[in-house]
Image (tube, coloured by chain):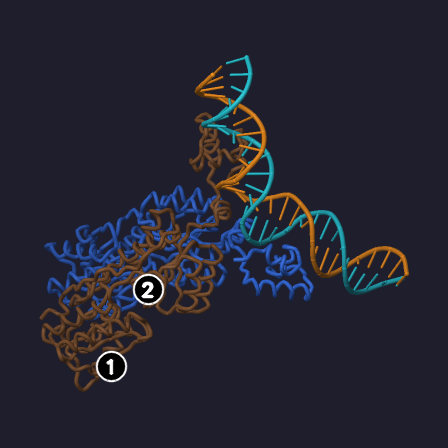
Chain colours: A brown, B blue, C cyan, D orange
Amino acid sequence: MANIQEVAKKAGVSVATVSRVMNGNTSVTSATRLKVEHAIEELKYEPSVLGRNLRNSESRLLLVLIPTISNPFYTEIINGIEETAIQNGYNILLCETDSSVQRENIYLNMVKNKVVDGVITMDPAINVNKLNDLARQYPVIQCSEYEEGGVIPYVSINNELAAYHAMKHLIKIGHERIALINSDEKFLYARQRRQGYNRALKEYQLPIDEDLIYHTDQLDFDYGIQAMRHLLQLEKKPTAVFAVSDTLAIGALKELNESGFQVPEDIAVVGFDKISFTNMTNPTLTTISQPMYKMGSTAAMMLINNIMGKKVESILLDHELVIRDSTLG
Amino acid sequence: MANIQEVAKKAGVSVATVSRVMNGNTSVTSATRLKVEHAIEELKYEPSVLGRNLRNSESRLLLVLIPTISNPFYTEIINGIEETAIQNGYNILLCETDSSVQRENIYLNMVKNKVVDGVITMDPAINVNKLNDLARQYPVIQCSEYEEGGVIPYVSINNELAAYHAMKHLIKIGHERIALINSDEKFLYARQRRQGYNRALKEYQLPIDEDLIYHTDQLDFDYGIQAMRHLLQLEKKPTAVFAVSDTLAIGALKELNESGFQVPEDIAVVGFDKISFTNMTNPTLTTISQPMYKMGSTAAMMLINNIMGKKVESILLDHELVIRDSTLG
DNA sequence: TTCTAATTTGTAATCGATTACATTTTTATT
DNA sequence: AATAAAAATGTAATCGATTACAAATTAGAA
């Protein structure tokens, strides 16, 4: 691949002029421009991004940190990030942390090293102190999970309200014993959704039965199965289940089918996220729709603005309750 | 962030010595090494990857091209790629082509521009000529989809044999009218799986009924639903369906459930890939298990070897038929 | 035509590392 | 102690772009 010197030589001009033609900001005679363009054409010159980045100290790369790529919730968000990034001349470096501190370190160093211009993190298990340190000097955006009252801009939804809506729906169709399959409450979203769960119950003067609340370590299908298995062993079984992730809800649904329970007749199920699978289950799954694509593109736009030195504000996007067969008698 | 000059100054040595300490290959007295390490510590120095890459003309980044991030088949492969990449000091730049020529161009230029050191493509719709051009000068590996008789190293499975196995299973349990939900036969894997389908039928002297073969444009659930809807309208309906992707099979299953058919009693279903969701459907889905993680890590290893100048050979990995409820009477 | 101002083009420093080669220091040998 | 050989360290070029500043060219005005 030819470099800028060779083009300059071939066109009989200086490298500065070639650079000017490439970037088109300062004035070049149309005659020389033509000469240079010819040389570029002939040599099939493509400027080295490495050289340019070193000089400009930018990489046009955005780091995206996700806990796992296996959850469709994240892949939809990534779609949104990628589209927006590309539209603005950026590309994304996708990295799974797998909640490993070592990986986290590698990735966060990439920001300091200027391998990337900024970072969007969706990892709820990220080290908050380290992230805040980083955010002091470099562009950082949190997506979906964030630090309450923190200084890092974020895009998310109102988790408390969304959970409240899901619960209100279950209560309104007559359920009184509603189980909650939650993830670890060390995560903000888990605490917030728990609060929504509590609020709805209180509002309708229903008791909060700790037996009906189950915490899982992860969000995979299997953990939903486990959770449901546990809940079915209770003496006083729930008549409905609210899971804080569709993947958990799908696992729960599976276990209910296996055990011969009718959904929603025996037990109703509500999920969270609206991943595309939820329309394929039998019955289809009632769920809280998160605007995942929008969340991704918003996060990307916020990060790019931040990189360009603009001040950005955190945003809470709207959710929506999607009522399907798993709660429709 | 401090640079190498500042460290050199603080340590009272030259930049070369600092570089030597950083890279640890050539000899440095333990006294000076200590001085330098102290300076590095104090200034919290991290070498600029940009500067290093420019000089070494490498980026330690691998480009991964996928048609879409939404299919779990690809995300499992990506897991394998990422793990292996990181183990070898590389990171991955994940890019969805969405089968857009424009994006394809952007991404392939990244290879020429040395933004990345090599590329793994899983996009079946990629422009083969362009890819071959690229592969003449740069490291390129194909994963899953490849060019038959081409020169680009690939890792895949024996698609013909896998489809043959799936069909043989269906035939052995008594099916004679077996529909095929295939994707566009412009893709090699589609042609190969079709061949396996044909071979099994021929071997058991069953007729090949073109009415039973349906082609879809994409692999999303909806296309599986469409396909099944079409097949159910046939006068002589199939008693079994073989779909070349789990996502299609899941859509088909959904449509069968909706339409009141019993699986596998009325119609049996076999998928392809063994994505995790196939264990969550009701009934669980019989499918061909592809070693996706292995495929990813193999592809990554091949690419890294290729980058290091080694010659690499194409590999076909083993598949496995996983029999589940959708074919178990 | 001559001079000034505006425009175009070139020169060379710069970004931050690596490394060939040169120089200095240390070690070993007689 | 003198010398050669080996080891440690430093100097400066290099990767490929951008850009401040300098120099050259052109245009315009008198």
**A128 sits left or right of A295 in the view:** right
Label annotation for residue B287: none
Q: Quadrant of residue B274?
A: bottom left
Q: Quadrant of residue A97?
A: bottom left
Q: Quadrant of the C terminus of chain B?
A: bottom left
Dot 2 corresponds to which residue?
A70
> Residue A184: where, in percent of width, then height?
31, 75
Dot 1 corresponds to which residue?
A230
Q: Quadrant of residue A103?
A: bottom left
Q: Is residue B163 visible?
A: no
- Tag 1 subunit: A
Q: Please rate how many residues cluster around mark 1, counting C-alpha atoms within 10 Å: few if below 14, some from 14 to 19, many from 20.
A: some
Question: Looking at the image, which residue is at 45% across and 36% down?
Answer: A22
B173 shown above or below A4: below
Q: Is residue B69 visible?
A: yes
Task: Measure the C-alpha gap from mark 2 to mark 1.
Answer: 25 Å
The amino acid beneath tag 1 is His
What is the secondary structure assignment of the residue under circle 1? helix
> Residue B303: where, in percent of width, then height?
47, 54
Question: Looking at the image, which residue is at 43% across and 67% down?
Answer: A130
Number of callouts in the render?
Answer: 2
- Tag 2 subunit: A
**A20 sits left or right of A222 in the view:** right
> Residue A148: where, in percent of width, then height?
32, 68
The amino acid beneath tag 2 is Ser
Question: Looking at the image, which residue is at 67% across and 63% down?
Answer: B32
